[in-house]
Amino acid sequence: MERFENSRLIAFINDSMETEKSNYSRVSAPYTGKRTLYGDKFVDVMKSYYDYAKSRIRIGVEGYNTSLQPIELYRALENLFKTCGEVHNIKIRRDPVTNALERSCIVILRGEGAGDKALQLNGSDVGGKKIVVTSLPPGLSDLSTGLSTDVLAARHVAHHRRNRSEGISVTGYNTSLPKDDIKNALSNHFSNCGEITDVFLLNSRALVYFYGLGSNHRAVQLSGTDLGGCTLVVRALPYPKPKEAAGGSASRPWTRLRNRFRSATLATTTG
């Protein structure tokens, strides 16, 4: 089910952002503040997707005659539940071994009050047997949190930015300054390169992460520039490879290092 919902999300975003492809910046272009993958409309697209997913009411149905042909069951359920609202989809499954209909299926409705109306159909006859109708949780687990769709969209985009950002290693700055001053100075120095998602200070170097097409390329070009009387040395960090399949190697070292500093920052904030 999760794989199905993820594929719907990908298709939804691709369709929504088809017209945005011509707005992508070239790597050598100056930073414009636009999001890399889906432009400034990323949050709006995600909110639309969550609104769409929230409008889909999932109803569980079981107890029908499993000897029916799939098309016969589909039409019978469609005729029954169309009185409740729009029948968006009916998920009828077969047993992978016997090829027989499974004992339960999912009806997805849309429309005000559709869920309550559907529950009133409990005990209706389908194929000569009485069905049991139940209400199912939302298809997206995020919708069960009780958060509004705009909050869910903003949280999704923030998570996406952090996981898709690229980093640089910076040395040569004055390490005797307070950490907050160093972070602010580095953030201001690299602010024109892209959207900064993280700044971590190690013993003698800093890791700065960006989200934005060409951000690392622009940041590396600032190697040799002056910051408070010191000459910076900037190098790009390797971009983490996608996670390997089960049984493969763990995350790359620079990813583990980044996650360690995030965890430490979170512990300091919440401790």
Image (cartoon, rainbow, N blue to C red):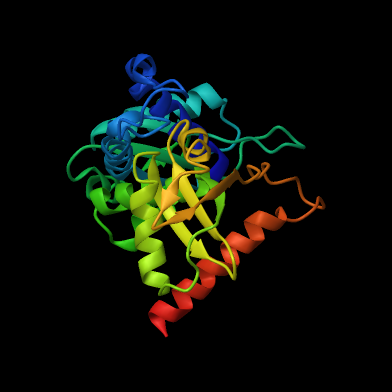
Q: Residue 52 in the image: x percent, y percent?
A: 30, 37
Residue ranking furthest to the front: 229
Q: Quadrant of residue 40?
A: top left
Q: Residue at x 53, y 37 (%)?
A: 4
Residue 211 point in image, percent of width and height: 44, 42
Number of marks: 0
Please, is residue 37 above or below residue 25 in the view?
A: below
Q: Is residue 247 visible?
A: yes
Q: Which quadrant of the figure contains the N terminus?
A: top right
Viewer-nearest residue: 227 or 195: 227
**Viewer-nearest residue: 224 or 35:** 224
Left or right of 67, for residue 215: left
Quick one: which residue is furthest to the bottom in this view? 271
**Residue visible at 69% across and 46% down in the picture:** 243
Compared with 211, 67 (above or below) is above
Residue 42 coordinates in the image, percent (x, y): 33, 35
The extreme left residue here reads 112
Q: Position of residue 181 (x, y in %)?
A: 36, 68
Q: Quadrant of the C terminus?
A: bottom left
The residue at 36%/29% (across/down) is 78
Q: Is residue 123 visible to us here?
A: no
